[in-house]
Image: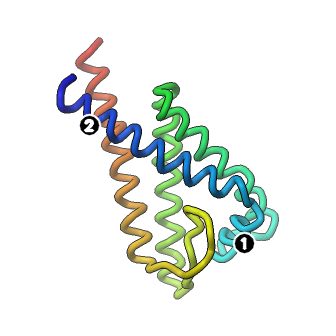
Amino acid sequence: MRKMGWMMVALRLGLAGVFIYAGAIKATNPLLFATQIRAYELSGFVGGGVLAVWLPWLELLCGLALLTHRMMGGALLWLAMLMVVFTAAQASALIRGITLDCGCFGGMDAPANPLWMIGRDLLILLAVLALALMRRRFFATHK
């Protein structure tokens, strides 16, 4: 397998692990996740509750799609959109002076550095976009 092929596999499996873990940890405690969503002050009580139930399963499904190499185009599109929204929410909290735990990977033990969270989210978005581009180029050359 060529270098691009190995990089695609590594990115695919790495992203799958991140989103399967993030989705699973949040799905096990939707009440805590709803509290974390609400801390952003971007949604109401009902909206936060709906997101707390729906979002972890979307992350899990996208992660499983990457892991099993099925429906990857749709999974990458969803993940790119989610990462843009997550990054915007973090930036909004930073601008408004809200200090919080992002809720990305479970527990709300301590507030994290918002610049670090934004940087991490941007790196994940970059990885998602890189995988989408590699996938597109790979299929364009292997028709």
Residue farthest right in this picture: 46
66 or 75: which is nearer to us?
66
Q: Quadrant of the rendered structure where residue 62 is?
A: top right
Q: Earlier in the sequence, mark 2 or mark 1?
A: 2
Q: Residues within 10 Å of mark 2 (few under 14, many from 20)?
A: some
- The numbered dot on residue 120 is none
Q: Residues within 10 Å of mark 1 (few under 14, many from 20)?
A: some
Instruction: Tell how many labels.
Output: 2
Residue farthest top in this picture: 143
- Measured as percent of width and height from the top left, residue 120 is found at 39, 64
- Measured as percent of width and height from the top left, residue 29 is found at 73, 60
The structure residue drawn at horizontal position 47% and vertical position 34%, both measured from the top left corner, is: 66
Q: Tell me the CA gap for discs 2 and 1.
A: 37 Å
Helix, strand or loop at mark 2: helix
The structure residue drawn at horizontal position 65% and vertical position 51%, both measured from the top left corner, is: 56
The structure residue drawn at horizontal position 29% and vertical position 12%, both measured from the top left corner, is: 143
29 or 113: which is nearer to us?
29
Determine which residue is flagged by label 2. 7
Determine which residue is flagged by label 1. 35
Check the picture and name the quadrant holding the N terminus. Answer: top left
Helix, strand or loop at mark 1: helix
The amino acid type found where label 2 is placed reads Met
